[in-house]
Image: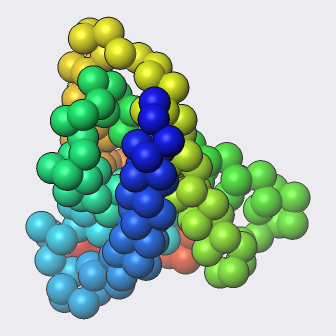
């Protein structure tokens, strides 16, 4: 890959980090701002569970990835799988980092949660950039797999917001309930 193309991709990754981070922070509040609108619940956290907070990374990252695709995505034959794997890496980072630090100190803290979020956004973009830069997963079969991964994540968010499994990942740490509160 040429030096200019790497610089170009790095610039898009930095812009993506800023966009995803800013929109992710705003999404934390949109469900309440919308007076708990059920449509907003699909892409905005409805409670304080770890699962719902994965939306803070996922949807801004996906929106940015679509916008980025319109500018530079078509020059990469591995763009979709790179973004799908970046998203998975970022989401897994949130889960692993959050449960590691809360397991060590016994409870969550807003500052530590924020650091986990921002590190996970960096990890998501770093993984996708690494895959794009090193031309990994270029076979044509990987692009539909990337689409399936992304669709599965979006469908899981939609489904589990309303019908969450009764496991720790889905429990609201404040109310000790699961899923969206019916009002």
Image spot of residue 160 (x, y percent): 31, 48
Q: Is residue 126 left or right of residue 162?
A: right
Q: Which quadrant does the C terminus fall into?
A: bottom left
Instruction: Name the residue nearer the viewer: 183 or 53.
Output: 53
Whether residue 51 appears in this view of the structure is no
Q: Residue at x 24, y 11 (%)?
A: 140
Q: Is residue 53 left or right of residue 143?
A: right
- Looking at the image, what colour scheme do you see? rainbow
Whether residue 76 appears in this view of the structure is yes
Q: Residue at x 18, y 71 (%)?
A: 40
Residue 56, above or below 131: below
Number of numbered discs on residues: 0
Q: Quadrant of residue 162?
A: bottom left
Residue 177, above or below 5: below
Instruction: Name the residue nearer the viewer: 19 or 25.
Output: 19
Image spot of residue 81 (x, y percent): 34, 28
Image spot of residue 54 (x, y percent): 45, 57
Q: Residue furthest front?
A: 3
Image spot of residue 153 (x, y percent): 31, 40
Residue 47, above or below 72: below
């Amino acid at each position: 890959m040429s030096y200019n193309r790497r610089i170009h991709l790095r610039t898009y990754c930095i812009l993506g980090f800023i966009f995803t981070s800013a929109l992710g922070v705003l999404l934390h509040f949109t469900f309440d701002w919308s007076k708990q609108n059920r449509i907003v619940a699909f892409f905005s956290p409805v409670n304080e569970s770890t699962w719902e907070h994965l939306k803070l990374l996922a949807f801004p990252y996906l929106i940015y990835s679509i916008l980025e695709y319109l500018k530079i995505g078509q020059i990469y034959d591995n763009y979709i799988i790179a973004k799908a794997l970046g998203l998975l890496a970022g989401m897994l980072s949130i889960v692993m980092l959050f449960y590691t630090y809360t397991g060590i100190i016994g409870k969550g803290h807003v500052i530590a949660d924020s650091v986990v979020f921002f590190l996970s956004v960096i990890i998501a973009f770093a993984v996708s950039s690494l895959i794009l830069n090193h031309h990994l997963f270029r076979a044509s079969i990987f692009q539909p797999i990337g689409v399936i991964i992304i669709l599965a994540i979006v469908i899981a968010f939609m489904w589990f917001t309303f019908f969450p499994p009764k496991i720790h990942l889905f429990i609201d740490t404040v109310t000790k309930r699961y899923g969206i509160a019916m009002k």
